[in-house]
Amino acid sequence: MARPTKAESVKIAERRAKNVALRMTGKSWAAIAEELGYKTPAAACQDFSRALEASIAEQHRSVELYREEELQRLDLLMTEAWAVLKRAHVTVSHGRVIYDESTGQPLPDDGPVLQAIDRILKIQERRAKLLGLDAPTKIEAITMDALDAEIARLSAELEAEASNPVPTE
């Protein structure tokens, strides 16, 4: 089967859009087939399914493109954060560089380095979320029935211990 031309593809897309719109208004497959020129109601139904599949595939492609753009932005931010991390920072107070009295060298400022580290960690966290790298959070649900059963078990255990005292020497 030959691939449809661009003009044919446009007509198919338009017919599918009408198909979906008609179905959403509650029209039967027979009515849609008659109105849009399908050979059978089953053909109208099948084309409706294809329209939905194409829509889902397009949404998936859009999400993937957006994810890739976001990853590229995060790469740029990471590059800038690493540059700040590696840069030498000096302590400044009231507009003046502070010097180490014993060496005469400018006193290093660790604040920007620590802020860059925090920023790098945030970028890495965002990247991991986008890529789904984080392990799912395990949640344990405890029902009232389970609590009641555990309370009953512990009460029975206490009663058994109370009725059978341990002999002392």
Image (cartoon, helix red, strand yellow):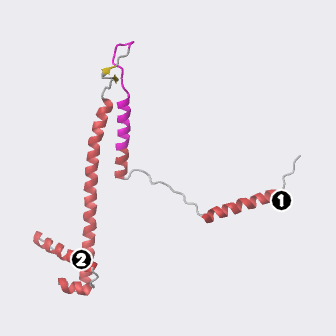
| Amino acid type, residue under disc 2 in the picture | Ala
User: Residue 122, located in which quarter of the rendered image?
Assistant: top left
Q: Does 80 appear above or below 91?
A: below
Disc ID at residue 21:
2
The spot of residue 56 in percent (x, y) is: 28, 67
Task: Say left or right for 165 vs 5.
Answer: right
The spot of residue 12 in percent (x, y) is: 17, 74
Q: Does 20 appear above or below 150?
A: below
Residues shaded magenta: 101-123
User: Residue 164, located in which quarter of the rendered image?
Assistant: bottom right
Which mark lies nearer to you, 1 or 2? 2
| Amino acid type, residue under disc 1 in the picture | Ser
Residue drawn 27% across the image and 65% down it:
57
The spot of residue 93 in percent (x, y) is: 34, 23
Magenta stretch: residue 117 in it?
Answer: yes
| Circle 1: element type | helix
- Total marks in image: 2
The spot of residue 101 in percent (x, y) is: 38, 13
Task: Answer few, some or many: residues within 10 Å of disc 2's Cα (few below 14, many 20 plus, some between 14 and 19).
Answer: some
User: Residue 37, located in which quarter of the rendered image?
Assistant: bottom left
Disc ID at residue 94:
none
| Circle 2: element type | helix
Task: Say left or right for 169 vs 125.
Answer: right
Magenta stretch: residue 167 in it?
Answer: no
Q: Does 7 appear above or below 104?
A: below
To which residue does mark 1 refer? 163
Residue drawn 25% across the image and 73% down it:
50
